[in-house]
Image (cartoon, rainbow, N blue to C red):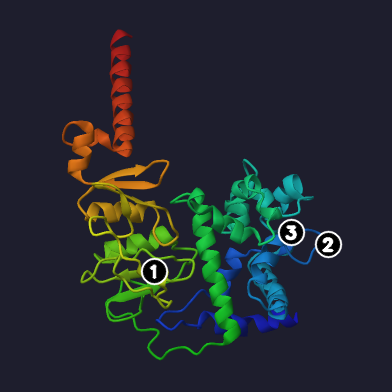
Amino acid sequence: KFFAMLLPCLLCSIASTANDWGGPVLGLGDVAILLPFGGPLVPSGQQVDRFLDGVLEELNDRAYAQQLIPVLEAQHDMRYDPDAHPCSEDIEMHCSTAESRIQCLGSQQRISQDCAAVVRHSVPFVCAELISRNGCNREPRGVLQCLENLGQSLGEASMCLDAVVATRQALYALQLKKMRKPKPQDSADSGNCPADWFRADERCCVKYWSPSCDIRCARDQCESHDWKWAWLDYRHRPFTCCEPGGTAIDAPNVGKKRRSSDMSVPHAQCPDGFEVQEEGCCLAQWSWACGEWCLEERCGRHEWVWLGEDSSGFRCCSADQVQSHHGGTPGLLDNPTHLFLASVVFSGMLFYLYHNHHRKIL
C-alpha cells in the first residue's frame, strides 16, 4: 500500500525527467510496460523474474533496485487486476512451473491476444527463441548483454532488437531518476521538429521509444517530415532526426561526447564507415551505430553499387568494378534482393497464367 501511495509521485518525477539535449525520457509507465513484472508473471516463491533482476543489477545500486521492484509491480497491478490477469490462463496452461514465465510465454506457438498485448514489448517474450538458443539465461553478464553481443543476429527489423534498444533507454531513464537530474528550462521546445519530437540543438530533434512508436515508427516520422534520420547507437542515445542542411551521418552524437572510435577517417575512395577490400570495392561490418540499412544508404549516397553481405561483411563497389566482374553494365538482377523480388514476380506470373488457363479448360 505504501508503494502504491508513493507511485504517483514517482511517476511524475520520472515522466518529467529530461536529458541535457531537450525532451523527456521514458516515464515510469513506459518502463513498466517494458518490464511487465507483476501478478502471475512473477514465478511463485520468487520476488522477481531473473531477467528483471539482471537488468536492475546494471543500475549498480542494489538498494535503489530493491526500491524499484515493488514500484514496478504496483504499476503493473494498477493496469491489470491480479485476480483477473490477461495471462493467468496461459500461464496456468503452459508456464506455471517455468523459471521465467514471460520467456515461457514467448516460446509458445499460441497464446491469447490479451496476454500477448501485456508482454509484447518485453525482451524475454520477443527474444525467447534467441535466449534459449544461445543460452543467455546462463550468461553471467545477464540476458540483456548476452543479446547485445549477438548484435546483427537479432535481425535488422526484429521486435527483439527494438525491445533491447527500448530496455536500454528505460535503464537510462531510471538512472536519471536516481541522479534527480534537473530539467532544462527549454526542454519542452519543439520548434519546427516533427510532431512529438523535441529540439536537441539548432538543427536536430530527438525523441525516445514509446509503446506507440518504436524505432521504425520514429524513422518514418522523421523521413515523412522531409528530414534526415541519424544513424546512431540508440541503446545509449535518443532517436535523432536532423534538418536537411546536413546528412544523417553528419548528425552529432547526441547525448555522448565523441570517442576516438567515433571519429575514424574512412579511406578516400570508400563510403563513410567502409574500408578498402580491393580496388573499387569497400567492406564494412555491422554495428549498433550503423547496421545493414545504414550501410546500404551510405553506399547509395556514394553512388556505388550495394552488393549486400558476404562472408567478409557488407560490400559496396564502384559501377566500373562491378561491370569488370560481370563483363557488362550492372543490371537489376546483380543485387540479391532484386533477384529475389524478380523471382517472386515471375512465380506470380506463372501462377496467374496457370490459373487462367485452368479456368478456360473448365
Left/right placement of residue 101 relative to residue 345 reads right
Q: Where is the N terminus found, in terms of image quarters?
A: bottom right
- The amino acid sitting under disc 3 is Pro
Give the labeled residue for mark 2.
45
The single residue placed furthest to the right in the displayed view is 45
**Is disc 3 surrounded by few (<14), some (14 to 19) or many (20+) residues within 10 Å?**
many
Identity of the residue drawn at 21% across and 41% down: 321
SS of the residue under disc 3? helix
Foreground label between 1 and 3: 1
Which residue does the numbered mark 3 point to in the structure image?
40
Q: Residues within 10 Å of mark 2 (few under 14, many from 20)?
A: few
Residue 305 position within the rendered picture, expressed as x and y whole percent measured from the top left: 24, 45
**In the picture shown, does residue 320 fall above or below 85?**
above
The image quadrant that residue 250 belongs to is bottom left
The answer, for residue 49, to whether it is visible in the render is yes
Mark 2 vs mark 1: in front: 1
Q: Which residue is mark 1?
A: 262
Disc 2 element: loop
In the image: residue 253, left or right of residue 119 = left
Which residue is more in the foreground, 44 or 272? 272
